[in-house]
Image (tube, helix red, strand yellow):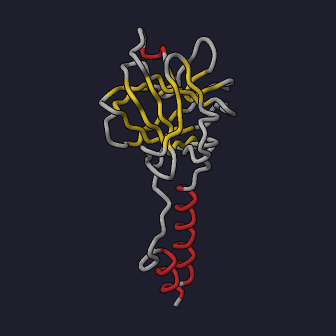
Amino acid sequence: MRRWIAVVAALALSGSMALAQENMLRNGGLEDGVVDPWISYGQATLSVTSDNVYEGSFALQVEVPAAGANFWDSGVQYQEGVVFEAGTTYTWAFFAKADHTVNINIKPELAQDPWTGYGEHQVELTTDWQEFYATWTPDTLVQPASLTLHVAFDAATLWIDAARWYVGEYVPYESVTAVDPKGKLATTWAQLKR
């Protein structure tokens, strides 16, 4: 019986460790109340809002006044401390929505010419919050690197919140909330010990 309990405890611990990724983004949820270190280029302008948030008190608001000649003509970037190590799997995930249906292009990339992309793909934002992500494993060191969103598909207002960049495969985001312990692991563990 004790052996079985040890196995259950080990599985529970490894499962909880798998879910706990270290977010390498500073101010990924904009809870500092400032845009920094997020930046924009082209015609996109950034601000922090408390009116349209996925969670917490703030979100990033992106104003795109007009479509560009190319969808990459305006963008949002996170570059602070971004390096992609060869052979390491990374995931960049975030929640986003827009004032109308519009595409954006997710492009973790080399932050200089030739702007090589990793896990690049386009997604469609709607007026509802959705989680989007890219996962990639570069075969060489990528430095300098950037987490880039191309936003010049159309004039729009976009909102981004709860951004994460971590080592490992994609794991769906779950808000941290108080949990009723009845029937949960701690309660079950206590019952097993008896």
Which residue: 48% across, 14% down?
Answer: 73
Residue at 63%, 26% (x, y): give it. Answer: 145
- Find residue 188 and report its horizontal and vertical position in percent: 47, 80
x, y percent for residue 176: 50, 60
User: In the image shown, does 165 or 84 lie closer to the viewer?
Assistant: 165
Q: As displayed, is residue 89 above or below residue 188?
A: above
x, y (%) of residue 80?
67, 32
Q: Is residue 175 left or right of residue 100?
A: right
Q: Seen in the image, is 148 located left or right of residue 140?
A: left
Q: Nearer the viewer, residue 172 or 161?
A: 161
Q: Nearer the viewer, residue 124 or 143?
A: 124
Which quadrant of the view contains residue 140? top right
Q: Pinpoint residue 116: horizontal percent, then vertical percent.
A: 56, 18
The residue under the point 47% across, 22% down is 150
Q: Residue at x 56, y 43 (%)?
A: 30
Q: Is residue 179 above or below residue 53?
A: below
Compared with 147, 55 (above or below) is: below
**How many numbered discs, if any?**
0
In the rendered image, the residue lying farthest to the bottom is: 194
Q: Report the front residue among 128 and 179.
A: 128
193 left or right, relative to 152: right
Task: Classify 122 as above or below 189.
Answer: above
